[in-house]
Image (spheres, rainbow, N blue to C red):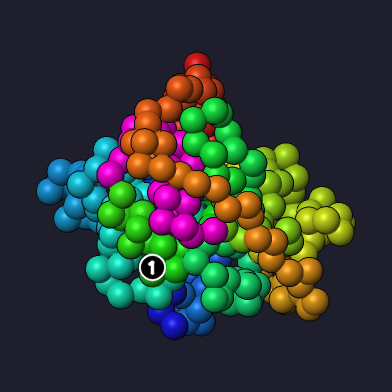
């Protein structure tokens, strides 16, 4: 099976991408568990010429509002390059290399950490955007669905898939929102967190610290099982509807600096 981890990043967060590249990504790729690519919006030709070999430039915006278009383009790229599955991953996520290879995803089309519907327009439960996995079939549906203007990329993905009858499966163990305030010792001392695989919201310096402490963690036996999410009807009208909410100011106004971020 050909697997791709597609990391959504942008030109102002190179320190984040480099921290992943020099830690868990090196191990995942080196051991042949998956291919990893860093996806960004289009840059000019001069900057592209200096890019790393694992970077892919897409003809989409490189800002927060453009993430749904970036995700559609990533799915299209993954299908075009014949990957059997693609995991969408944020650039602040740490993945335990040895646990990634045993993530329960097959034979399902859509697996992640699911949340209930957000807002009143789109009815599906959706996987948190920091890390979730799509089959080739699911990725093709996302790539082929016209964007409805939803600013929330993971909500758009779930709505598009529900329209085609694809149901998500929640993994209660492997996807953890622990950052930025939980360091490796805190994670490893808490039973609810220490069995996880993907941990989100970490700045570059913290990514290196997590890798030193967690890179050799082994898979955990006796997974509790994936939980099927409710099947809902998404009509053509719902799929084409515009959102009735907006990007939260703390996300829209976030400014990234060398080793962190601030909002204004």
Residue 226 forms part of the magenta stretch:
no
Question: Is residue 23 among what the camera can see?
Answer: no
> Compared with residue 73, is residue 234 higher up or lower down, i.e. above or below?
above
Residue 61, how many percent across, how many down?
A: 27, 38
- Is 75 or 161 nearer to us in this picture? 161
Residue located 72% across and 76% down the image: 218
**What is the x, y in percent for residue 219?**
72, 76
Packing grade of label 1 (10 A; few <14, some 14-19, many >=20) is: some
- Residue tagged 1: 137
Quadrant where the N terminus is found in the figure = bottom left
Residue for point 37% across, 50% down: 71
Going by the picture, which residue comes out furthest to the left?
45
Q: Nearer the viewer, residue 93 or 144?
A: 144
Q: Is residue 189 left or right of residue 85?
A: right
Q: Is residue 27 left or right of residue 212?
A: left
Up/down of 30 relative to 205, above or below: below
Residue 2 falls in which quadrant of the image? Answer: bottom left
Taking the image as shown, residue 219 lies to the left or right of residue 51, namely: right
Q: Is residue 11 above or below residue 141?
A: above
Query: Over which residues does the magenta segment extend?
Result: 146-167
- Does the stretch in magenta take in 147? yes
- What residue is rendered at 59% in x and 46% in y? 125
Q: Nearer the viewer, residue 239 or 63?
A: 239
**Side of 10 where 129 appears, left or right:** right
**Residue that appears at 54% across and 76% down:** 107
Q: Can the viewer see residue 253?
A: yes
Give the farthest residue toward the top: 264
């Amino acid at each position: 099976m050909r697997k791709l981890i597609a990391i959504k990043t942008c030109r102002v967060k190179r320190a984040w991408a480099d921290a992943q590249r020099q830690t868990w990504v090196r191990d995942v790729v080196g051991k042949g568990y998956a291919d990893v690519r860093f996806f960004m919006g289009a840059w000019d030709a001069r900057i592209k010429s200096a890019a790393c070999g694992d970077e892919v430039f897409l003809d989409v915006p490189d800002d927060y509002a453009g993430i749904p278009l970036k995700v559609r383009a990533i799915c299209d790229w993954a299908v075009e390059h014949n990957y059997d599955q693609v995991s969408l991953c944020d650039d602040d996520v740490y993945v335990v290399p040895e646990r990634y290879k045993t993530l329960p995803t097959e034979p399902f089309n859509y697996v992640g950490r699911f949340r209930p519907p957000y807002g009143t327009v789109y009815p599906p439960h959706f996987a948190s955007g920091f890390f979730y996995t799509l089959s080739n079939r699911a990725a093709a549906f996302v790539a082929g669905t016209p964007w409805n203007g939803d600013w929330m990329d993971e909500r758009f993905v779930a709505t598009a898939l529900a329209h085609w009858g694809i149901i998500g499966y929640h993994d209660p163990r492997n996807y953890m929102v622990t950052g930025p305030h939980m360091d490796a010792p805190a994670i490893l001392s808490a039973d609810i967190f220490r069995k996880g695989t993907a941990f989100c919201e970490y700045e570059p310096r913290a990514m290196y610290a997590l890798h030193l402490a967690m890179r050799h963690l082994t898979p955990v036996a006796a997974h509790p099982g994936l939980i099927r999410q409710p099947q809902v009807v998404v009509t053509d009208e719902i799929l084409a509807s515009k959102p009735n909410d907006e990007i939260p100011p703390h996300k829209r106004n976030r400014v990234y600096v060398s080793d962190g971020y601030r909002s204004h």
